[in-house]
Image (cartoon, rainbow, N blue to C red):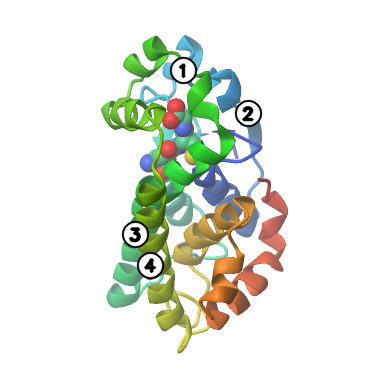
């Protein structure tokens, strides 16, 4: 087996999703840290592997696989032990839908809150922003450099809470996000709720009385694959 994972070890929700999947499936891999704080993701050497300048990237038998959700689906289809995708079409749809929603919430909510929290945006020059390989990143970073107003933050937090309430509804009648089994949807949202915790906002789950979600988070954190967890 020849698997290498290019990822940001200390953080990166998208990298964490792939680490959780690899660990759950019991797959050995070579870990290559791409330090986002040192902009290693924008260096020519890394851009040869991932032309979008984003982590994670998986290399399996010299095949380059990008995009965390797609990497996890690929791993699940290639390595059959400890399956993470439901067979039944409706449950499969539910898993894919929830992974897609997590990515949306990551982009529209967590990305803003995280950059504001880390202050990383202030260390980027206008030239670096202008040359980012991803068009949406250029727009996002340009906007963020102007600062987020309190109203912006309130809107983002309200949107996020609404999504968490949706998950609470699912978990009120299911052990896992897609029914009886732990799936890639649980992996995606584990990484998201970890980010909420890192931002010091986990108390919102208590405040909004999202008890099923809190119980689920307790359970996913106690699973063996959680050993790949880093903020
Ligand atoms: N859709 C991509 C998003 C990946 C992504 O946004 N990665 C972040 C870290 S979590 C990144 O590489 N950021 C570097 C940058 O924006 O320059 C995926 O799911 O893999």
Q: Which of marks 4 and 2 is in front?
A: 4
Q: Is the residue marked 1 within 8 Å of ligand 1, measured from its CB?
A: yes
The label number, if any, that marks residue 42 in the structure image: 1
| Identity of the residue drawn at 66% across and 45% down | 231
Q: Earlier in the sequence, mark 1 or mark 2?
A: 2
The label number, if any, that marks residue 32 in the structure image: 2
Q: What element carries label 2?
A: strand
| Identity of the residue drawn at 57% across and 82% down | 211
> Relative to residue 64, is residue 16 depicted above or below?
below
Q: How far apart are marks 3 and 1 (CA)?
A: 27 Å
Q: Are marks 4 and 1 in contact (CB under 8 Å)?
A: no
Q: Distance between the residues labelled 4 and 1?
A: 32 Å
Q: What element carries label 1?
A: helix
Q: Which of marks 4 and 2 is nearer the N terminus?
A: 2
Q: Distance between the residues labelled 3 and 2?
A: 28 Å
Direction from residue 23 to residue 85 in the image, left or right? left
Q: How far apart are marks 3 and 4 (CA)?
A: 9 Å
Q: Where is residue 14 in the image (x, y as percent from the top left)?
A: 49, 44
Q: Earlier in the sequence, mark 4 or mark 1?
A: 1
Q: Which of marks 3 and 4 is nearer the N terminus?
A: 3
Q: Are marks 3 and 2 in contact (CB under 8 Å)?
A: no
The label number, if any, that marks residue 101 in the structure image: 3
Q: Mark 4 points at which residue?
A: 163
Q: Do the residues labelled 3 and 4 touch (CB within 8 Å)?
A: yes
| Identity of the residue drawn at 28% across and 29% down | 139
């Amino acid at each position: 087996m020849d698997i290498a994972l290019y990822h940001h070890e200390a953080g990166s929700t998208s990298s964490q999703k792939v680490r959780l999947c690899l660990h759950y499936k019991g797959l050995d891999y070579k870990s290559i840290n791409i330090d986002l704080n040192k902009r290693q993701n924008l260096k020519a050497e890394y851009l040869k592997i991932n032309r979008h300048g984003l982590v994670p990237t998986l290399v399996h038998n010299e095949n380059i696989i990008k995009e965390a959700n797609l990497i996890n689906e690929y791993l699940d289809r290639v390595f059959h032990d400890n399956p993470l995708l439901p067979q039944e079409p409706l449950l499969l749809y539910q898993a894919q839908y929830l992974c897609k929603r997590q990515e949306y919430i990551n982009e529209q909510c967590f990305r803003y809150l995280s950059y504001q929290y880390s202050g990383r945006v202030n260390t980027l020059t206008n030239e670096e922003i202008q040359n980012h390989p991803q068009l949406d990143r250029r727009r996002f970073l340009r906007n963020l450099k102007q600062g987020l107003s309190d109203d912006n933050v309130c809107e983002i937090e309200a949107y996020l809470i609404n999504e968490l309430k949706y998950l609470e509804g699912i978990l009120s009648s299911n052990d896992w996000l897609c029914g009886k089994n732990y799936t890639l949807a649980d992996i995606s949202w584990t990484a998201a709720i970890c980010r909420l915790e890192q931002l010091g906002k986990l108390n919102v789950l208590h405040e909004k009385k999202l008890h099923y979600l809190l119980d689920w988070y307790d359970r996913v954190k106690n699973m063996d694959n959680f050993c790949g967890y880093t903020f």
